[in-house]
Amino acid sequence: MADLLFNVGYGHFLVLAAVLFLIGVGGVLIRRNALIILMSVELMLNAANMTLLTFSRMWGDLSGHTFALMVIAVAAAEASVGLAIVVAVFRGRKNVDVDRLTTLRH
Amino acid sequence: MRLLIIITSAILAWGAAETIAPSLAVADAIPAQVGGNARVKPISTRTPHSDRVASSGTGMALLFWAFAAATVGGALFVITRRNLIAAVMGMVGSFLGIAAVYMMLYAHFLSVVQMLVYAGAIMVLFVFVVMILNRPEDEPVAPTGRAGQAIGAIAIVYLVGRLIMLLWKVQPPDPTKALAAPGLTPEGHEWGTVKAVGTDLFNGGLFPFEAISILLLVAVVGAIAIARPLHDDQDNEGNTPDGEGH
């Protein structure tokens, strides 16, 4: 118990990343606002990054850092394009509620 | 209310770690298995470090819990708030906590990049878009359709259950091994610095690096092309002297 509290190791970081990922999944599942969904996706990407860095440290291999850098760049690209889509959708429909974006369903 | 959320998240993180955190033992057990057990085949020929990451003292442990609480609390703030600006602020807090956790993993460079790119750039972008939209959400949680709600609830329960099962099976850590582990590796002081990451990036990751630059260029062009007003709007907003866009 005390060992668990005061001896922080790799597992703590992995568990933190897993909790973060679960929160992101929950946000994508329960929220309807497209902006919140985008932010939840960013949370999931961050959780994956944290896992990469933890394993990188664990194995003594810096490739994890390189890949995390790539993930951050891809996340930035995703955020910019996703927000552009949100703005375009809002311009046409005056809301960004994903439950009402059903035009492609027909 | 906010205090309640933060406390709840801290308890959640603590509880999750309590049930699961023995998974540290997995990390510590790997070197022994590599030596004698052929069942575990490491991808790399190198054996993992057996030290306790960066946090070997009580102070570091307390800091870890504080930043973990900030991270999880901010994340919970994001998915529970109706006010979008509040959600963005929670996101910023979460990213700052993540950056601090990166620092504990000796990822100094990635930590700074995290703060610059996420808390500095992406979140500012989100704030701008929130200001443009400026419409409060009617109901934060999707109420439409019993089936959709049921599927969402089942998915969440399944994911949480899988995580708990995964963590439950992990064996508790060996205190003697943990205490015997060294604090820092010889190269520890250089681990994760700009020099080290840059060396690795431009040795093995040169092609992905260049591909990322093209990806970012395409994303910039795509974002401008998508978010730019339609031609109808340009006509309505008044004609420019040179007739641009016609």
Image (spheres, coloured by chain):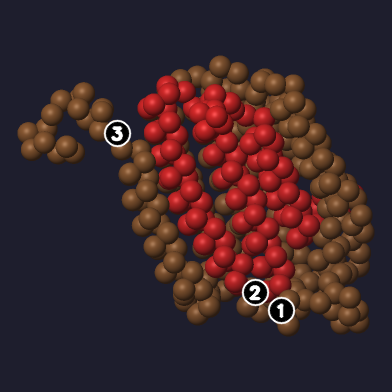
Disc 3 chain ID: B
Q: Are marks 3 and 1 on the same chain?
A: yes
At 73% from the left and 35% from the top, the residue drawn is B9
What color was chain A assigned in the picture? red
The spot of residue B189 in percent (x, y) is 60, 72
Q: Nearer the viewer, mark 2 or mark 3?
A: 3
**Residue B98, relative to residue A32: is it above or below?**
below
Is residue B56 visible in the rendered image? The answer is no
What color was chain B assigned in the picture? brown
Check disc 2: other Cα within 10 Å, few if <14, some if 14-19, many if 20+.
Answer: some
* Residue indicated by mark 3: B229
Q: What secondary structure is marked by label 3?
A: loop
Check disc 1: other Cα within 10 Å, few if <14, some if 14-19, many if 20+.
Answer: few
The spot of residue B188 in percent (x, y) is 64, 73
Disc 1 chain ID: B
- Distance from disc 2 to disc 1, alpha carbons, whole Å, reads 8 Å
Marks 3 and 1, the one that precedes in the sequence: 1
In the picture, the disc for residue B44 is 1
Q: Nearer the viewer, residue B226 or B92?
A: B226
At 65% from the left and 54% from the top, the residue drawn is A48
- Distance from disc 3 to disc 1, alpha carbons, whole Å, reads 51 Å
* Residue indicated by mark 2: A61
The quadrant of the rendering that contains the N terminus of chain B is top right
Q: Are marks 2 and 3 on the same chain?
A: no
